[in-house]
Image (cartoon, rainbow, N blue to C red):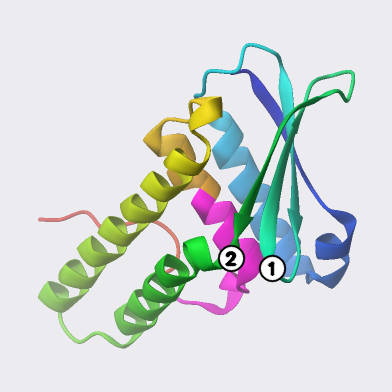
Amino acid sequence: MPLNAVVIDERTLQRGSEAQHVEWDANIRELLSKAKCSVEDVATLHVSLTEQRFILDFRDDDERELGLIAIPHDVLSEHITEYIDIVRQIADADGVNRMETLDMAKKVTHDRAGRVLKRELRDFGFDLETSRRLFTLLLSLRVDTTRLVGIHGHRTIR
C-alpha cells in the first residue's frame, strides 16, 4: 500500500507538548519510510484517540474512506503497560547483562503488540514491521514517551 501520510486528530495535537509533536513527527516519518501493506490505493491514515479507543481511518487522495478500524484501548493496554514497565526498568538497570535482558524483553513485547495490530489490520495487509512502527506511534499518543529514558531503539547484543 502506498501509505503516503499519517494525520493525527486535532484534539490530540492540541493536548501534546512541543516535545511530543517532535516525537510524533519522527514516529510518523519512521512508519511511512518502510510501510508495507496490501491496499492498492494511495492512502492517508487519520489517527484519532478517544477515551475508549484508537480510530484508524484510511482515506484515499479524494478523502473517500477506504476503511475504518476502531481498536479499543484494552486491546493494547497490557502491551503498553508492559513496554513502559520494561523501559523504566532499563533506566534503573545495573550492568550490561541486565540491560541486554531487559532490552530483549522490550523487543519481544514490541513484537507481540505488532502482531496484535497486524491481526486488527488484517484487511489492510500490514506486515509485522509496519505494525510495530504503528504501535510505536500509538504508544506515543497514549503515553508521554518524551519523559522516558530508553524508550527509543534496541541495544546491539554482543
**In the rendering, at what x and y percent does residue 42 appear?**
71, 16
Name the residue beneath numbered marker 1.
Answer: 52
Find residue 73 and name its label. 2
**In the rendering, at what x and y percent does residue 138 appear?**
59, 57
**In the rendering, at what x and y percent does residue 56 appear?**
69, 44
Task: Name which residue type carries label 1.
Answer: Gln
In magenta segment, residue 140: yes
Task: Name which residue type carries label 2.
Answer: His
Check the picture and name the quadrant holding the N terminus: top right
Do the numbered discs 1 and 2 sit on residues whose CB atoms are within 8 Å? yes
* In this rendering, position of residue 84 left or right of residue 23: left
Magenta range is 135-149
Circle 2 — which element?
helix
Residue drawn at 53 percent across, 37 percent down: 121
Residue drawn at 69 percent across, 13 percent down: 41
The answer to whether residue 34 shows anywhere in this view is no
